[in-house]
């Protein structure tokens, strides 16, 4: 039985290890759609933006909580021989007596006024004469009560519950809650903007890698052609139809193409590293995207409707409107309710019911004069509202101008790509023609190398323009999504 359990534990551990190993395996032939989905789950910057969104949502809960008031429970234990404290402790515990005022000493003096010198009780006339004597009155009133001034130390335990509830604040609390809700919406827009930025970077990386792979393929073809030319030059040199400098010129061109291939592969490796960083997971290879069918046909009205910067500016204007309302609340009265229940004693929770107490009340407060500060604060918030309103207009016009600029650059790039493809095709045919003429002895190796350089130059120009075009199209997507 123990062996069976041990075998089960071994199988379970192996399965966990296998799952962990599979989870750490690099992505192979990863499609763009899958990469975008993974980024929303795994990208670190998106995770941080999600934390900000959740923090803002908790801010709404905090603002809502203020409407329900505040309930506090307080337990306090004290010990003191301070005359004021001790008398206050007794009074709060409902245990104060006349003896605490020093009445025993007062009554002693009062009793002496009622006695004759021989120790017998005085009649009323004698008592009136004795007590009416100013000197006797002064002596009696100047008696220092020892128990009141020098009390014994006393313990004091106070337990109470306080509840304070705002009843009316000039809509300040409700506006703060709405502002918190708008700030939560702002945080959500910020997260969506980060997601759009990561989508832009992932898409651009996919197109960069696809373009680099195509460039490497074209360069490899050119390299093969140069290698064939080198072999032909070696044969011509053996027969005396070519010089050593011709062979060196071909090998120099071959070395240049190999350098470009090395740079293309290094850039592709860097692009894969960046993609792995975006997905927070190693990516070994991707599924190539089509470079020719990639286009952008998003109308301007859709961009203005969906753009998150514009939405944030409009939401900022809405928040500033509420801030004006919050400032107006300073001219409204504030009304609050208060309730307290507790008990005090010289022992903890001793005689709780006998010594309990309560206090309830309501308070209304209205600011009459504050040196004009509240008025100027209101004017300040109104000016901020006008400023934000203009910022909304600026955001819309700025996005529209940026859209027109990008679409114009895309249109120009489309024309350049179309023209460069034809020029590249022509340069390639001219090179092949000169290569054949060289083999027939009708052209020099220098002419062939020049035509080869022109072909590579056209290829590089096409690569650069295609890269610019793809980036501009992605920028339009970033504006709209």
Image (cartoon, rainbow, N blue to C red):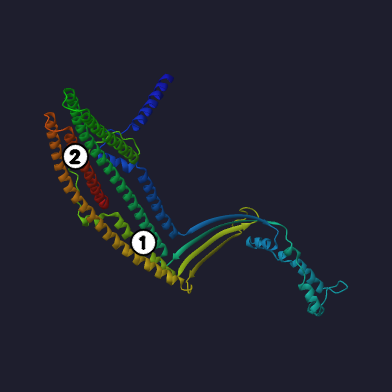
Q: Is residue 307 left or right of residue 106?
A: left
The residue labelled by disc 1 is 319
User: Which type of secondary structure does the marked residue at label 2 adopt?
Assistant: helix
- Please name which of the two marks, 2 or 1, marks the residue nearer to the observer: 2
Question: Badge 2 local density, few (<14 within 10 Å), some, or many (20+)?
Answer: some
Q: Which of marks 1 and 2 precedes in the sequence?
A: 1
Determine whether 186 is above or below 120 in the image: above
Front-lying residue, 218 or 52: 218
Front-lying residue, 134 or 219: 219
Q: Is residue 96 left or right of residue 219?
A: right
Quadrant, the N terminus: top left
What's the mark number on residue 454?
2
Determine whether 11 is above or below 327 in the image: above
Question: Badge 1 local density, few (<14 within 10 Å), some, or many (20+)?
Answer: many
Is residue 290 shown to the viewer in this render?
no
Q: Is residue 111 left or right of residue 96?
A: right
Can you give x and y, in whole percent of width and height, for residue 260 in the image?
A: 26, 36
The residue under the point 26% across, 52% down is 479
Residue 346 found in image quarter: bottom right
Residues at badges 2 and 1 in contact (C-beta under 8 Å)? no
Residue 330 found in image quarter: bottom left
Can you give x and y, in whole percent of width and height, for residue 218 in the image?
A: 20, 35
In 3D space, how far apart are the residues under numbered discs 2 and 1 (Cα atoms)?
A: 60 Å
The residue under the point 38% across, 46% down is 48
The residue under the point 26% across, 32% down is 255
Front-lying residue, 85 or 275: 275
Is residue 135 shown to the viewer in this render?
yes
């Amino acid at each position: 039985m123990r062996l069976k359990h041990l075998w089960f534990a071994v199988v379970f551990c192996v399965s966990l290890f296998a799952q962990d190993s599979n989870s750490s395996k690099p992505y192979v032939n990863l499609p763009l759609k899958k990469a975008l989905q993974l980024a929303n789950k795994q990208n670190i910057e998106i995770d941080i933006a999600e934390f900000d969104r959740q923090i803002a949502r908790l801010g709404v809960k905090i603002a809502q909580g203020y409407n329900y008031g505040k309930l506090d429970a307080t337990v306090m234990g004290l010990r003191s021989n301070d005359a004021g404290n001790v008398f206050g402790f007794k009074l709060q515990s409902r245990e104060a007596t006349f003896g605490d005022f020093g009445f025993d000493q007062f009554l002693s003096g009062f009793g002496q006024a009622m006695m004759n010198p021989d120790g017998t009780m005085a009649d009323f006339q004698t008592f009136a004469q004795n007590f009416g004597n100013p000197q006797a009155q002064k002596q009696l009133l100047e008696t220092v009560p020892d128990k009141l001034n020098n009390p014994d130390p006393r313990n004091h335990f106070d337990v109470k519950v306080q509840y304070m509830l705002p009843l009316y604040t000039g809509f300040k609390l409700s506006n703060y809650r709405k502002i918190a809700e708008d700030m939560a919406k702002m945080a959500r827009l910020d997260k969506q903007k980060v997601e759009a930025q990561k989508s832009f970077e992932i898409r651009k990386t996919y197109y960069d890698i696809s373009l680099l792979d195509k460039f490497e393929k074209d360069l490899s073809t050119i390299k093969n052609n140069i290698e064939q030319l080198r072999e032909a030059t070696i044969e011509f040199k053996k027969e005396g139809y070519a010089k050593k400098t011709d062979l060196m010129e071909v090998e120099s061109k071959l070395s240049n193409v190999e350098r470009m291939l090395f740079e293309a592969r290094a850039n592709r490796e860097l692009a894969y590293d960046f993609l792995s960083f975006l997905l927070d997971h190693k990516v070994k290879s991707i599924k190539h995207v089509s470079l020719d069918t990639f286009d952008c046909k998003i109308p301007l009205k859709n961009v203005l409707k969906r753009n998150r910067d514009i939405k944030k500016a409009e939401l900022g204007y809405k928040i500033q409107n509420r801030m004006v309302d919050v400032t107006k609340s300073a001219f409204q009265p504030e009304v609050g309710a208060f309730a307290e229940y507790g008990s005090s004693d010289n022992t903890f929770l001793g005689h709780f019911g006998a010594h309990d107490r309560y206090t309830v009340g309501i308070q209304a407060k209205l600011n009459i004069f504050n040196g004009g500060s509240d008025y100027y604060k209101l004017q300040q918030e109104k000016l901020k509202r006008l400023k934000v309103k203009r910022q909304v207009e600026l955001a819309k016009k700025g996005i529209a101008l940026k859209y027109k600029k990008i679409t114009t650059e895309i249109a120009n790039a489309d024309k350049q790509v179309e023209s460069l493809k034809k020029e590249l095709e022509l340069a390639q045919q001219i090179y092949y023609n000169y290569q054949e003429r060289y083999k027939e002895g009708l052209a020099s190796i220098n002419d062939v190398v020049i035509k080869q350089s022109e072909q590579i130059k056209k290829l590089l120009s096409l690569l650069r323009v295609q890269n610019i075009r793809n980036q501009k199209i992605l920028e339009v997507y970033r504006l709209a999504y």
